[in-house]
Image (cartoon, grey):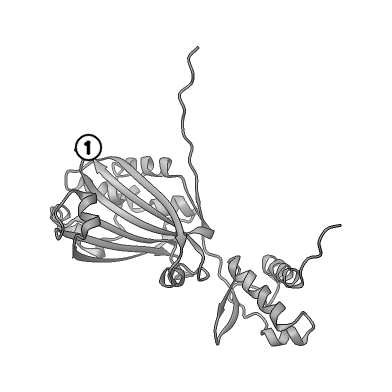
């Protein structure tokens, strides 16, 4: 005999079905009934209704804000990142004509959105290299670095698709003053084309991937429940000369990100 479904789970499943069906009152941005109202309707005790709402929040369907109730979340684009294809495609894009570069980008590929549906937000600053950055780039601690912070969103929703901290040695980036200017973003052709303007070709990209729980600030910007998992991507670009020329630390929402890999293998000879 199958175990009986807990009352809170049954209530959560019913609300989830209403959200999926677009039932009036359960559409993105709609305020869900107050807990006390559902209790009065006989949907369960306060503890039961609260458990149902918390389950829906953990599943990314609603957001609960103290003093503001519970709302159905706006659907945020999912990302499918095929890094092997992504990096090869971006390098080829750097050699395409300006018009092509201006109307294509890796975020488009990851999300399936059109290029004009993506908004880029960028803030640049100059900072001294700490021990970790100095070791990664092979420079002295305190070396001036260009720190670029990026996040992307859609016109309808300011939720960040990811959070990116990018670093370059400042003296290297300064070979092209435009690379120091955040108003030039989004840069047509991305990092590969940026590097090409200062005589650098990227030979390989090394990825490091791990996970942890989101900080409160990350959860707020990414529009995910507090305590949700995030994927951390450490992306290091190495030039044909063997130098680390760019490093990005990327925070991705675990519930909206899929990493796909296809690894060609050598066939056995018999």
Foreground: 148 or 51? 51
Q: Is residue 85 above or below residue 71?
A: above
Left or right for 90, reference 5? left
Question: What residue is at 45 percent from the left and 72 percent from the top?
Answer: 220
Foreground: 232 or 126? 232
Instruction: Give the percent coordinates (x, y) of residue 204.
Output: 30, 39
Foreground: 173 or 156? 173
Left or right for 218, reference 169? right
Instruction: Give the percent coordinates (x, y) of residue 263.
Output: 46, 34
Q: Return the residue at label 1.
A: 240
Specify the quadrant of the image occupied by residue 155.
Answer: bottom left
Question: What residue is at 68 percent from the left and 82 percent from the top?
Answer: 33
Instruction: Give the percent coordinates (x, y) of residue 270.
Output: 50, 12
Q: Is residue 239 above or below residue 128?
A: above
Question: What residue is at 70 percent from the left and 87 percent from the top?
Answer: 36
Specify the quadrant of the image occupied by residue 118.
Answer: bottom left
Q: Number of callouts in the render? A: 1
Secondary structure state at the residue bearing disc 1 = loop
The quarter of the rendered structure image containing the N terminus is bottom right
Q: Residues within 10 Å of mark 1 (few under 14, many from 20)?
A: few
Foreground: 240 or 98? 240
Question: What residue is at 14 percent from the left and 61 percent from the top?
Answer: 142
Left or right for 74, reference 154? right
Instruction: Give the percent coordinates (x, y) of residue 116.
Output: 42, 60
Q: Outermost residue, top direction? A: 270
């Amino acid at each position: 005999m199958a175990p009986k479904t807990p009352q809170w789970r049954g209530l959560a499943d019913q609300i989830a079905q209403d959200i999926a069906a677009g039932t009036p009152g359960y559409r993105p941005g709609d305020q869900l009934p107050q807990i006390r109202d559902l209790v009065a309707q006989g949907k369960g005790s306060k503890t039961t209704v609260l458990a149902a709402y918390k389950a829906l929040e953990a599943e990314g369907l609603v957001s609960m804000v103290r003093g503001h109730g519970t709302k159905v979340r706006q659907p945020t684009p999912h990302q499918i990142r095929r890094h092997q294809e992504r990096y090869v495609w971006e390098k080829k894009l750097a050699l395409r004509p300006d018009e092509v570069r201006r109307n294509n980008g890796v975020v488009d590929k990851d999300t399936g959105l059109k290029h004009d549906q993506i908004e880029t937000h960028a803030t640049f600053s100059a900072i001294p290299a700490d021990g970790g950055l100095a070791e990664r780039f092979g420079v002295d601690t305190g070396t001036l670095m260009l720190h670029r912070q990026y996040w992307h969103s859609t016109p309808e929703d300011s939720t960040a698709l990811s959070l990116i901290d990018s670093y370059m040695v400042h003296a290297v980036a300064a070979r092209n003053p435009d690379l120091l200017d955040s108003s030039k973003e989004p840069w047509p052709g991305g990092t590969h084309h940026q590097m090409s303007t200062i005589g650098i070709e990227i030979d390989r990209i090394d990825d490091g991937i791990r996970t942890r729980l989101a900080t409160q600030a990350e959860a707020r910007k990414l529009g995910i429940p507090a305590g949700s998992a995030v994927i951390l991507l450490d992306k290091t670009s190495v030039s044909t000369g063997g130098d680390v020329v760019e490093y990005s630390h990327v925070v991705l929402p675990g519930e909206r990100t899929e990493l796909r890999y296809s690894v060609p293998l050598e066939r056995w000879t018999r």
